[in-house]
């Protein structure tokens, strides 16, 4: 899933809101067109195949004592009972795509499971799985979830129901927060530093785990509030789950540096008497990721590169585009390395595959899925089709499309197709008329001026009545951006988005549509602004990263022709930097000092910067705290501080 800030935001917003507000208008029932569209998928996919329903229950040992996990202060970290509606028998509700409903029903099966003798997983008590390997003297933990509280609950469960053992090793598969942030719930940092417990991760883990969404964290987290539906009620007309998992925990996020980094494919090591072989997979689902194999169990851990869904090549919250070609080639290497011998495979989400034939077929199909997307997008682009034309025409072959694990429950197919086009060609389609498009508000006003709002509303309503919800939403969106107080247009657009949400097979796509509909009907439902920082994450930032982060907050146009130059000295880390502001840029130089001409030399501990990031100190008051020594013009520093922006989390998305 994928990173610190958006997953921290995800459930903290859900729980703080508690969805106490009701829809002022809506939600509406599914229309006949939505029912017919969903029926097409029911007729196409092999819903009579119940293998997955057998597999998710295989090896079940025990559930949690309670579906509600609380923190030390009594706060609710996760409430799994809010998804109990998924357990209802019978056909999917009319307001949920039947394929997505099937996926979320599978993900509602939670608890402790035996994969094979000596290998266990606790699944669906958080967004990801936590796995346990029986070592010679204790448990080797793989991916300790999103929070200390859920990781500890999982460890307590296996200790109570299988065997009470210490943790003797930890493996992080990759650099996303739902796979490492519960680390302090299973092991003490001092034991790791003393060499008692190895913590193993792929090369680049710390840099990527801290940095991936620090710089765009505010916008990503806000968009994540749409992507995960955390402002929506949990019911068949609201959020039903994310496709990758149900939801994530809002507990304590922790991190410290691993003691061992894996650097190359084929590397081997023994952890508490268990041999492990590694395969590097950077630039696939995460910038730092690895897969590995346990010869003793003939088991492949697929991390997050092969799951029971088409994954994201570009997340809807926003991120760097992932390489579908590299992803497919990585899985092909997995087959070459272990495909002949493996008899079971499991991953960081969903449920395992048993038997060599099924292990191999799953890997082959997922390999071909990503390769097909990559190659066919490039083929169609080379034939002159544009991004949106390719997405509209793109269809998977039946051999791939009829496998449930290739369906777009998390990574929406059309979104991934557009993302692959973007990976190679950028956002522009090459049409010179689209090279410098008007911004949405200005464009909307010109459409309204040219056509007239009454005519546009009439056309949008006619499109809605014919089931053409895409066009209805397109027209009304122009009106909304031209006339943000036009509630009739907002309500009609919301109705159209809602029906598209009911038809969506992707959990994130559904959540975006329904969240947009809610915001259009009721405005932004503000709650307490989430704190997306964690002391461990902040401490994990290098000083360069911190200064880059300040640069993102720096209002360059406001600076004008002013210039500032400072020397920075950090005694606790023995670092020195120059810091300058000119030409609209806040820049720095490492291991440098201005020999003359600096406005001031500022001496402060790096830990003081951490306090600023955590909100314990205000940058504007820094010069008055006594924690900073100034040699030179303090007033110049106080002037510089006035050029930093504070981001508002609750900016609108569905309206201007």
Image: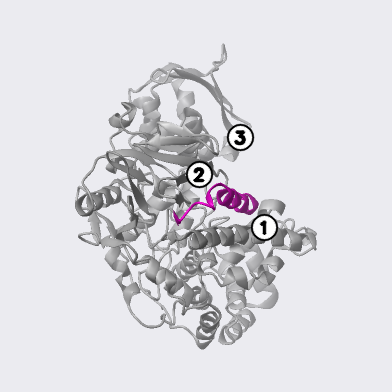
Image vertical order of residue 656 relative to residue 175, above or below: below
**Label 2: which residue?**
289
In the picture, measured across the screen, residue 578 lies left or right of residue 427, that is left
Image mark for residue 529: none
Image vertical order of residue 487 relative to residue 362, above or below: below
**Residue at horizontal 20%, vertical 47%?**
72
**Residue at horizontal 70%, vertical 52%?**
424
The local secondary structure at tag 3 comes to: loop
The answer to whether the residues at label 3 and label 2 have Cβ atoms under 8 Å apart is no
The answer to whether the residues at label 1 and label 2 have Cβ atoms under 8 Å apart is no
Q: Nearer the viewer, residue 273 or 326?
A: 273
Which is nearer the N-term, disc 3 or disc 2?
A: 2
The span shown in magenta is 323-345
**Label 3: which residue?**
584
Quarter-wise, where is residue 128 in the image? bottom left
Q: Is residue 203 visible?
A: yes
The number of discs equals: 3
- Magenta stretch, overall SS: helix
**Label 1: which residue?**
374
Q: Nearer the viewer, residue 99 or 117?
A: 117
Q: Is residue 478 visible?
A: no
Name the outermost residue toward the top: 595
């Amino acid at each position: 899933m994928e990173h610190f800030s958006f997953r921290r935001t995800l459930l903290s917003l859900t729980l703080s809101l508690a969805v106490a507000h009701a829809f002022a208008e809506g939600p509406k029932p599914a229309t006949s067109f939505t029912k017919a569209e969903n029926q097409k998928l029911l007729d196409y996919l092999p819903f009579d195949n119940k293998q997955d329903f057998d597999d998710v229950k295989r090896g079940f040992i025990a559930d949690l004592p309670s579906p509600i996990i609380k923190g030390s202060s009594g706060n609710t970290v996760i409430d799994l009972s809010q998804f109990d509606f998924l357990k209802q028998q019978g056909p999917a509700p009319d307001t949920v795509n039947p394929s997505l409903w099937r996926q979320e029903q599978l993900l509602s099966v939670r608890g402790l499971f035996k994969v094979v003798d000596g290998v266990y997983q606790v699944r669906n008590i958080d967004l990801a799985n936590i796995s346990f390997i029986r070592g010679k003297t204790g448990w080797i933990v793989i991916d300790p979830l999103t929070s200390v509280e859920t990781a500890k609950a999982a460890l307590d469960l296996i200790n109570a129901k299988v065997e009470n053992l210490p943790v003797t090793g930890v493996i992080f598969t990759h650099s996303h927060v739902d796979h490492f942030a519960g680390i302090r719930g299973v092991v003490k940092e001092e034991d790791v530093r003393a060499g008692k417990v190895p913590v193993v991760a792929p090369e680049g883990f710390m840099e990527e785990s801290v940095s991936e969404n620090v710089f765009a964290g505010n916008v990503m987290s806000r968009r994540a509030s749409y992507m995960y539906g955390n402002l929506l009620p949990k019911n068949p007309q609201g959020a039903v789950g994310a496709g990758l998992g149900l939801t994530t925990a809002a507990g304590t996020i922790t991190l410290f540096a691993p003691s061992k980094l894996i650097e190359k494919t084929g590397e081997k090591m023994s952890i508490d008497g268990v041999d492990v072989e590694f395969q590097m997979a950077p630039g696939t689902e995460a910038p730092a990721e690895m897969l590995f194999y346990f010869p003793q169990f003939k088991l492949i851990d697929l991390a997050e590169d092969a799951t029971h869904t088409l994954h994201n090549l570009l997340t809807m919250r926003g991120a760097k585009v992932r390489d579908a070609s590299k992803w497919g080639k990585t899985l092909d290497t997995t087959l070459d390395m272990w495909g002949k011998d493996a008899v079971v495979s499991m991953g960081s989400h969903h449920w395992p595959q048993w038997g060599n034939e099924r292990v191999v077929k799953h890997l082959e199909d997922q390999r071909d899925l990503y390769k097909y997307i990559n190659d066919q997008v490039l083929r169609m682009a080379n034939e002159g089709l544009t991004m949106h034309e390719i997405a509209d025409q793109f269809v998977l072959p039946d051999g791939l499309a009829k496998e449930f694990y290739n369906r777009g429950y998390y990574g929406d197919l059309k979104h991934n197709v557009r993302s692959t086009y973007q990976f190679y060609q950028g956002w522009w389609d090459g049409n010179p008329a689209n090279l410098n498009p008007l911004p949405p508000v200005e464009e909307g006003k010109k459409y309204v001026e040219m056509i007239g709002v009454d005519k546009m509303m009439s056309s949008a309503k006619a499109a809605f009545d014919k089931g053409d919800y895409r066009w209805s939403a397109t027209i009304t969106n122009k009106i909304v951006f031209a006339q943000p107080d036009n509630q009739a247009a907002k309500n009609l657009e919301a109705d159209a988005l809602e029906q598209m949400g009911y038809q969506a097979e992707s959990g994130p796509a559904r959540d975006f549509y329904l969240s947009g509909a809610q915001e259009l009907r009721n405005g932004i439902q503000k709650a307490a602004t989430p704190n997306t920082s964690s002391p461990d994450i902040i401490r994990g930032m290098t000083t360069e990263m911190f200064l880059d982060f300040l640069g993102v907050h720096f209002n360059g146009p406001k600076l004008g022709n002013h210039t500032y130059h400072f020397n920075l000295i950090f005694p606790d880390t023995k670092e020195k930097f120059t810091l300058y502001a000119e030409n609209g840029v806040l820049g720095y130089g490492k291991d440098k000092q201005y020999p003359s001409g600096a406005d001031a030399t500022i001496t402060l501990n790096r830990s003081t910067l951490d306090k600023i990031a955590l909100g314990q100190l205000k940058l504007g008051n820094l010069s008055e705290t006594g924690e900073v020594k100034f040699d030179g013009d303090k007033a110049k520093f106080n002037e510089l501080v006035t050029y930093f922006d504070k981001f508002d989390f609750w900016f609108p998305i569905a309206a201007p």
